[in-house]
Image: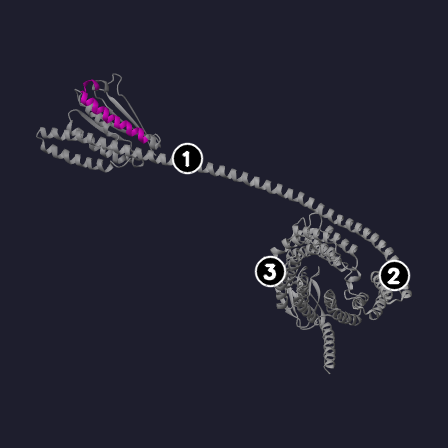
């Protein structure tokens, strides 16, 4: 009764799993769509399109994509051109993503001939290469070469990187790992992409270069913008690398990290893969309980996805049971695999295995052969024979000489163990015939492989030569650009030097001008101070002489004359003091002061001289200016040193005549004893006073002429040929 319940329970499980597999398979639909600019509908190629269940693809040159997903899955669009976009699938409608503000990259005028049209064609060649990647390696490589040739000798680094990455993926698929690594590394030299680094790390792992894989992949752990699917692949590849380095603990840790992300983002295929790889790691350490637990997880999860994935996982776990000598469990799983294969349209789980044959390919003949081996291991020879015969028949129909050879040899051995030597001999003869056929085929395959390798090498050399030409041309272009930049930099430096020199000269000229102006102002200030000082020195001399005149009146007890003289003197002194701060006063004011002064002197020496002042009526005396008290010392000398010592009464004449419109001549003439006789009569003290008074006049005239450009010119001469009389001529410019 209990046994019957177990059988019923097992039947229900198988029935439910079968239904779930069929329903899961039916729930997958093909979603199509595009990614374009909103304003100009420009296609955006290279956009990464993924689902939260692990499906992944990229947009082609027309911005279009196709991806298999289920209703309710989340579509994720990621690119450097825009922020990530998410869309929940509700039906099998087309999904069109319009990117706002997108504009294709601009190119220079020289590159305009190979702009958007060339880039679009480049993507088409890459799409064609991906189409033929599985079925025709040579054709696929030809499309890659055309995509590189289309870019020209200078090329676009981003597009060139895409071509080399795609070529690396093609070589990776066909297990040409060395060539894949070379092209991935070349692609990274032109553009740093996390996707390319992941592929390079994976190629290193598959090629057994685990240390190189670890060094390439570890820095990617610091990246923050990786999509979940790529993050899972990163942890998976690192786990594979550390497993290859026999660091199983680190390998399991990375697998566990990747498993958590895959579970969180519901990336079902990777959840199954990572459970299976963790089980492999534990199995290699002989931790069988943990290994079996993760294998069971992978089996249970495989039942929820496509049947092909379940068959692969069944075979993997069956191999584990075989290693543990659990033959009954192995046989049960392999029989399930046979049942699953019979329900598929194709007798191969991996349709691509026909293009790339592998010893691990899952086929009906191989599974039958392994079931037979499990029976033989239990000495159940009669149960093994039907599976061997079935394996031979299927291998013959599928032209699988390797399995046919092994199964025929094993069948011969089974018959020999059973003592049926005639059938053993017959089977052995069949085995020899298959071996001969296999030998011939191997020779053909070796020949084809050699030819194929030569063709691949030729095509790779062509691609390498295109790349070398591009690099050489790029180097020449870079050199020309560098020379141009150097020339521009040199020109810029020369301009800066010239501008600096000009600025320096301007600054020097400005400094010189300011220094000159400051010097001139300082000189002017000094001259003004000197003039003021000279005027200050002159005034006491004049006052002393005037007070002497007043003293004479007092001595003569002429009080009335003294009062009149003091009144006129006070008027004169007030005017002199008022004008003492001025460099120039009007000629009319100066003549008034002179007339007042002569009047005062004449009142003292009325018996010694008479005088007259003649001014040309045509002269506008207000239009001319003269330094104050400039003429007074000359008149004073004429009276005191010329007329005062004359025995008879003398005469003083002051005349103002206009020589030209801009020039006046003022003459002071006396018919006194003359300069020579006057000098002979003077005492030493009088000589000093004369020298001092006339010296001040000369200094004033010199300073004024320096400041005002020869405004005043004074000349002194004898009035008569007998050296009697004196004439002072003063020429005054209008300005």
Number of callouts: 3
Q: Nearer the viewer, residue 373 or 75?
A: 373
Locate residue 620 relative to residue 636 in the image: left or right: right
Q: Report the mark closest to the observer, 2 or 3.
A: 2
Callout 2: helix, strand or loop?
helix
> Which sits earlier in the primary sequence, circle 2 or circle 3?
3
Mark 3, residue position: 225
Res. 483 mark? none
> What is the magenta range?
679-704
For residue 195, what is the image quadrant? bottom right
Residue 703 is inside the magenta segment: yes
Q: Report the mark closest to the observer, 1 or 3.
A: 3
Marks 2 and 3, how far apart at CA: 58 Å
Mark 1, residue position: 512
Measured as percent of width and height from the top left, residue 296 is found at 68, 70
Measured as percent of width and height from the top left, residue 631 is found at 25, 29
């Amino acid at each position: 009764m209990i046994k019957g319940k177990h059988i019923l329970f097992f039947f229900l499980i198988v029935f439910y799993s079968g239904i779930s597999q069929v329903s899961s398979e039916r729930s997958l639909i093909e979603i199509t769509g595009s990614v374009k600019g909103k304003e100009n509908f420009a296609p955006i190629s290279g956009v990464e399109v993924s689902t939260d269940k692990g499906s992944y693809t990229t947009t082609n040159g027309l911005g279009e994509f196709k991806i298999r997903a289920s209703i309710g899955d989340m579509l994720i669009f990621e690119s450097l051109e825009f922020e990530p976009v998410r869309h929940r699938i509700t039906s099998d409608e087309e999904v069109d993503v319009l990117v706002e503000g997108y504009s294709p990259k601009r190119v220079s005028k020289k590159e305009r001939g190979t702009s958007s049209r060339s880039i679009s064609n480049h993507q088409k060649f890459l799409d064609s290469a991906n189409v033929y990647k599985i079925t025709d390696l040579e054709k696929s490589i030809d499309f890659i070469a055309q995509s590189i040739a289309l870019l020209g000798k200078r090329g676009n680094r981003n597009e060139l990187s895409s071509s080399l990455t795609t070529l690396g993926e093609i070589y990776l698929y066909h297990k040409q790992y060395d060539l894949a690594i070379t092209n991935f590394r070349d692609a990274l030299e032109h553009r740093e992409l996390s996707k390319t680094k992941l592929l390079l790390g994976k190629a290193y792992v598959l090629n057994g270069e685990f240390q190189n894989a670890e060094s390439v992949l570890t820095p990617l752990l610091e990246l923050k913008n990786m999509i979940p699917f790529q993050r899972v692949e990163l942890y998976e590849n690192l786990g594979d690398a550390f497993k290859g380095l026999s660091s199983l603990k680190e390998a399991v840790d990375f697998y566990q990290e990747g498993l958590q992300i895959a579970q969180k983002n519901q990336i079902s295929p990777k959840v199954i893969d990572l459970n299976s790889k963790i089980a492999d790691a534990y199995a290699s350490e002989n931790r069988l309980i943990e290994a079996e637990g993760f294998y069971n997880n992978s089996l249970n999860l495989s039942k929820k996805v496509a049947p092909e994935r379940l068959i692969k996982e069944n075979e993997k776990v069956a191999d584990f049971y075989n290693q543990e000598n659990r033959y009954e469990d192995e046989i049960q799983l392999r029989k399930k695999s046979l049942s699953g294969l019979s329900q598929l349209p194709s007798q191969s789980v991996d349709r691509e295995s026909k293009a790339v044959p592998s010893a691990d390919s899952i086929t009906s003949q191989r599974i039958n052969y392994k079931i037979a081996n499990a029976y033989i291991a239990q000495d159940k020879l009669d149960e093994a024979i039907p599976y061997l015969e079935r394996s031979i028949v299927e291998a013959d129909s599928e032209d699988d000489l390797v399995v046919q050879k092994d199964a025929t040899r094993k069948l011969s051995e089974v018959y020999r163990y059973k003592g049926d030597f005639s059938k053993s001999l017959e089977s052995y003869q069949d085995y020899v015939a298959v071996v001969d056929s296999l030998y011939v085929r191997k020779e053909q395959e070796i020949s084809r492989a050699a030819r194929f390798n030569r063709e691949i090498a030729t095509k790779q050399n062509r691609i390498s030569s295109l790349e070398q030409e591009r690099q050489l041309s790029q180097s020449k272009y870079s050199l020309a650009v560098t020379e141009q930049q150097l020339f521009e930099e040199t020109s810029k430096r020369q301009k800066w030097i010239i501008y600096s020199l000009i600025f320096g000269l301007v600054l020097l000229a400005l400094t010189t001008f300011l220094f000159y102006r400051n010097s001139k102002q300082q000189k002017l200030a000094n001259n003004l101070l000197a003039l003021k000082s000279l005027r200050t020195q002159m005034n006491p001399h004049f006052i002393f002489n005037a007070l002497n005149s007043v003293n004479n009146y007092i001595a003569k007890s002429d009080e009335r004359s003294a009062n009149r003289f003091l009144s006129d003197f006070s008027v004169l002194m007030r005017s002199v003091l008022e004008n003492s701060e001025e460099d120039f006063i009007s000629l009319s004011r100066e003549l008034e002061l002179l007339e007042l002064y002569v009047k005062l002197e004449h009142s003292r020496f009325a018996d010694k001289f008479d005088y007259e002042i003649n001014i040309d009526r045509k002269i506008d005396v207000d239009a001319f200016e003269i330094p104050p008290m400039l003429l007074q010392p000359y008149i004073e000398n004429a009276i005191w040193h010329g007329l005062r010592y004359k025995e008879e009464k003398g005469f003083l004449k002051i005349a103002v005549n206009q020589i030209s419109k801009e020039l006046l001549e003022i003459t002071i003439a006396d018919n006194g004893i003359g300069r020579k006789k006057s000098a002979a009569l003077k005492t030493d003290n009088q000589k000093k006073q004369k020298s001092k008074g006339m010296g001040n006049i000369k200094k004033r005239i010199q300073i004024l002429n320096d400041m005002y450009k020869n405004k005043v010119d004074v000349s002194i001469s004898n009035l008569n040929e007998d050296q009697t009389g004196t004439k002072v001529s003063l020429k005054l410019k209008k300005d």
